[in-house]
């Protein structure tokens, strides 16, 4: 009953086998091998347009490089208050961008509110040099709250960003989970909505270490080669990231793994909804379930071997918790077994 | 006949199998798993003292983090002119350290000369704030020229560094090759010689992606946790780097792989020495052979499928090349086959 | 009727004359002259203890250097949401500190609330490397809202900072205005309250360009010499900053100038309080008056030659303004004439 | 007999008076006053084209901002080995540019050799991401060795820079001394020769603190406003820098002051040339004289009150000094009196 995080899972067998299959022989280094090129092309197919692809080692690296590539002196990046860049990257975006500021935007259930975004951007008049200047907007899909921006919601965020001429980045650490949750194409969830840069995550969904930064405008790729190398993110045996993506993107494996994770989350949610003692904080869209448990129930579950984290209670929820209740996060993954879900529900 | 670089090789089967063996199940993330801890302890055993170990994704990351951890405003790092940090990392040391300067030190065959180092350090009087101030010394073992600092040579460098109270870093991208070349223990080649920080490389010697930054003073570890995380080098599924090192460090695999690579280099060197047309630039100590070939010989080898790079001619060699000759670098690895060496020698 | 900012005023005659008096002759450069030393000693007298003094060119430089000197990777600085570092320095604190994050703390009338500060700091558990870590607290005295922290209020902020082992910085761009407002000694408003670093401003109170960064722990001075030089803030003819401070600090000139500015603000406030059309947003403690004017009154004043800025309405005030009213800031200075104040009041 | 540096002198009376004249009244802050605008226009007149002008506090700031404005990840700046940016700015160029590397170029008497520059640039193949990439060339006029690049020599440097598409910066800390030394117009010494950015120094030639960064392409000004502000170099009472330049640039004062300094240097040089005991290291072009003195002569001069620095012996001179001789630098300024020169020569 491991619901702590999707990055506690290991690697899917197909991905492990792809790595094994490419272990022998020689290949040119630093992202120039045939396999690197082949997988890059695969990304262009998936996105239905030519994209520039940069493999990196962590989602934090993808996010921080993306933001650093559009930064300027005094730059301000707008993100949701609970966004990974804002609360889980120990200043990497600020470091990579030489001091950009992250400006948190509020919004319930992990999603920036378009009008809240507009209001925050307006606090920085474009030609007022003292206060800094807007530089980018970044949204997370699926969000850290297990919710998904609908295409219309992305459109609304993009409209605000574009009206201020700001590039729009998507942190897609759980891209596949969002995609199958919405049942749209990768293109429809990204560049057709106005996304300019994408952190495409594979690690949380069955890879060992496979993240890609996608530039929908390949003319920006030249600078990124230098930024990535300078950030120590150009891997000599880059083909082993490529090998993971090769398997991941073949025959809809990535989508199937995400479907499984989301289905396990839905099963958890259904069970909790039916419980007399516990209840959902909100309904999950992807593979993270936020649940309100009595503390003794949580303790009992932990004694039974369940692993999950208690969670910061957002303002929007503060009134809804009783004194003896806590908010907890449960994350499912490609590796989650329905037996574990059912055991959890039994106690819950 | 792939002699372009040791990072063109793949992964050794034992390492691939270790990754496969750890693919299943769950493990806590971000370097906190049992396997991470176990491998960290193994490093302490190997170095015969408690060390702090930080897994990172690239050798450049290990080097740049090491140097950033000892930097101060106006800091200057002393390294050999041909050092990887100076010529192959696209400004990563400068970026990670917020602008430290690399001060190149000369010395033949890739090794800093202790007196040359002393002279360069003396150009920065300690309390003269205008000129910057010495901050660290870094040496590469084995060097980029395929040579190895003897213990006495490391002592001489360390004596200079210590007399100026400067921390001493070793870039050990080819640590194992140096170790077996000298036939000393890891402790004897590092902290017993005065090394404070070590970039311990596994990638070039049979891993896919396994680098470790070793701090011989574990009390410095606390800051490094933040530095590594901020640099986007803390891997969520860190155990897969650990899994590689587990196999690598078991039963002397790492030393045996390096012995093979060095033996292949020696075989190449012997063959070239016996050639009427070609000759060694200098005798190799580890797994890199620098050879002077007539350009038509080089072309013929390339037509036969040999892959290798032509190389920047160092000043010390400038007089020794004829007009129709070039300097070339041949790198062997754990994967090099003696047949390929012999085929190369036949033409050479 | 110039009430736009105290930095629109020129230089007080005594300061201009001191510059003239020191124009001739030679003096050793870069802060080493006798005059530099003499003025540094004067600061130690004023603060009743040995302090380290660093002259710099702007208040932003003093603030950013102070914060950079205590930064660490992933560091977070806590400041009031309206603090100059947060809204008026275009990312200088982030730049100087290599990416520190500013975490805004709320509090009415420009003052951080101690419990609000505590709550914000607690959001960063000390050993949780993902989220960054608290690094410093900075408060502004007098605040950007024209209010002054009482000694007890500083004590409360300092208690929070110290309980988290965080250094405490004071942005004293309007230090003298606060000092005479409280009628306490410089020591009582700073290190006796727990302040570790102080940006001591002279420019807004009658100097041309005279700012000093004061370290109450002189053992920290060594690093600051390098930080200041690297930041291009070490002036070759530093004695001309010293010359301004020499006059400024002689015979209570600085206090008298601040008393005048505060008295002019009080006169403005009294007049506005007596007005039937206009009213104070809150009562001023120092030399900034925030006033609620009907927009047609504001326009009329501007037509009569009054210069002042309209101001961002803080949340605490949002309900109190009628549709046809605006919030405006009036700043007085050493140069403000009572005639101008009275003319303003007549219309107001 | 103060020959230590031109920044030991004070301020010229005309400049002190201009400051006094502008001390009263009000002016809009942060570089927006009428006086700021007027002086900016004067610069455009002087350079015979529209230029963008940014007042800053130090020459180091002007240099570092100039280089930071053209930097890119992995960028390398080429400068003479003895250039101020390389040996006297404590890492400010690296800090401001987020880690650009300075690549020293050799050349006798402080001047980069165009072919040496070409050779250094060629060490960085443009598309080789590992080694970093050329970013800018900077030359100092007059040089740190008291010499002046002739127009033809600037043309040669510019031709190399332009052939590699690199912007060309001039560090003009002693711009006026070079100008009158060459007897050309400001335009002829700068943009007509291919200079893109200029650090225009006034401090060493009679101002208190007046430096300007000049952009010959005003379309680049927008970004510089943010860079300067973020670097804490935007002065609130900017008009006092403007006031200095107003006097400095009026009626050829700046040129006359430089002519005087150069004439004093020539007088020193003539006297030393005629000495039996001492000799010039090389003939001065501007206001710095490098002289070879017997150590006992140097000591005697110092006992008589002469102040000057001993100097690092460049390689080109190493053979020419006897054991009992040293190299010394004598700097003259607008304030140097001929009596002091003559007294010096008497002993020398």
Image (cartoon, coloured by chain):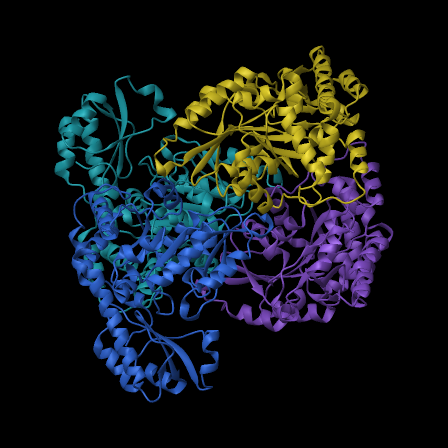
Chain colours: A purple, B yellow, C blue, D cyan
From the viewer's side, name the closer residue of B255 and B97. B255
> Viewer-proximal residue, D217 or A307?
A307
Residue D233 visible in the current orientation:
no
**Taking the image as drawn, is residue D180 in sight?**
yes
Write down the quadrant of residue A159 in the picture: bottom right
Left or right: residue C224 compared with residue D273: right
Q: Position of residue D10 (x, y in %)?
A: 21, 47
Query: Looking at the figure, which quarter contains the C terminus of chain A?
Result: bottom right
Between A232 and C216, which is closer to the camera in this rendering? Answer: C216
Quadrant assignment, res D304:
top left
List the single residue furthest toward the right: A251
Q: Is residue A234 left or right of residue C144?
A: right
Residue found 40% across the figure and 45% down from its top: D170
Q: List x then y, in percent, for residue A252.
A: 85, 54
Please report the residue visible at 17 percent of the width from the left and 32 percent of the height from the top. D306
* A204 displayed left or right of B191: right
Residue drawn at point x = 37 percent, y = 34 percent? D110
- Position of residue A292 measured from the top left corner of the image (x, y, whole percent): 70, 64
């Amino acid at each position: 009953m491991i619901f702590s995080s999707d990055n506690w899972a290991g690697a899917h067998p197909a991905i492990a086998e792809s790595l094994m299959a490419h272990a022998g022989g020689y290949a040119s280094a630093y992202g120039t091998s045939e396999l690197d090129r082949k997988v890059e092309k695969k990304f262009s197919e998936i996105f239905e347009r030519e994209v520039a692809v940069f493999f990196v080692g962590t989602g934090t690296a993808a996010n921080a490089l993306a933001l650093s590539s559009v930064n300027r002196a005094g730059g301000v990046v707008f993100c949701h208050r609970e966004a990974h860049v804002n609360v889980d990257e120990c200043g990497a975006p600020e470091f990579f961008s030489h001091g950009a500021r992250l400006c948190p935007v509020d919004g319930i259930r992990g999603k920036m509110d378009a009008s809240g975004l507009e209001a925050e951007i307006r606090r920085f008049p474009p030609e007022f040099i003292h206060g800094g200047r807007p530089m980018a907007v970044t949204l997370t899909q699926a969000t850290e709250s297990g919710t998904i921006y609908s295409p219309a919601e992305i459109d609304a965020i993009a409209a605000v960003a574009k009206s201020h001429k700001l590039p729009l980045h998507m942190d897609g650490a759980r891209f596949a989970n969002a995609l199958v949750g919405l049942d749209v194409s990768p293109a429809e969830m990204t560049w057709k909505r106005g996304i300019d840069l994408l952190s495409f995550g594979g690690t949380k969904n069955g890879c060992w270490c496979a993240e890609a930064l996608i530039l929908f405008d390949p003319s920006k790729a030249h600078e990124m080669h230098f930024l990535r190398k300078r950030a120590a993110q150009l891997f000599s045996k880059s083909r082993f990231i490529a090998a993971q993506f090769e398997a991941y993107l073949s025959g809809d494996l990535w989508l199937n793994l995400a479907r499984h994770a989301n289905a396990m989350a839905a099963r958890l949610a259904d069970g909790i909804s039916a419980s007399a003692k516990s209840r959902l904080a909100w309904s999950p869209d992807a593979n993270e379930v936020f649940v309100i448990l009595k503390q003794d129930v949580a303790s009992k579950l932990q004694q039974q071997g369940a692993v999950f984290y208690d969670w910061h209670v957002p303002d929007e929820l503060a009134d809804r918790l009783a004194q003896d209740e806590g908010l907890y996060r449960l994350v499912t993954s490609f590796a989650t077994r329905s037996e574990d879900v059912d055991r959890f529900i039994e106690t819950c």
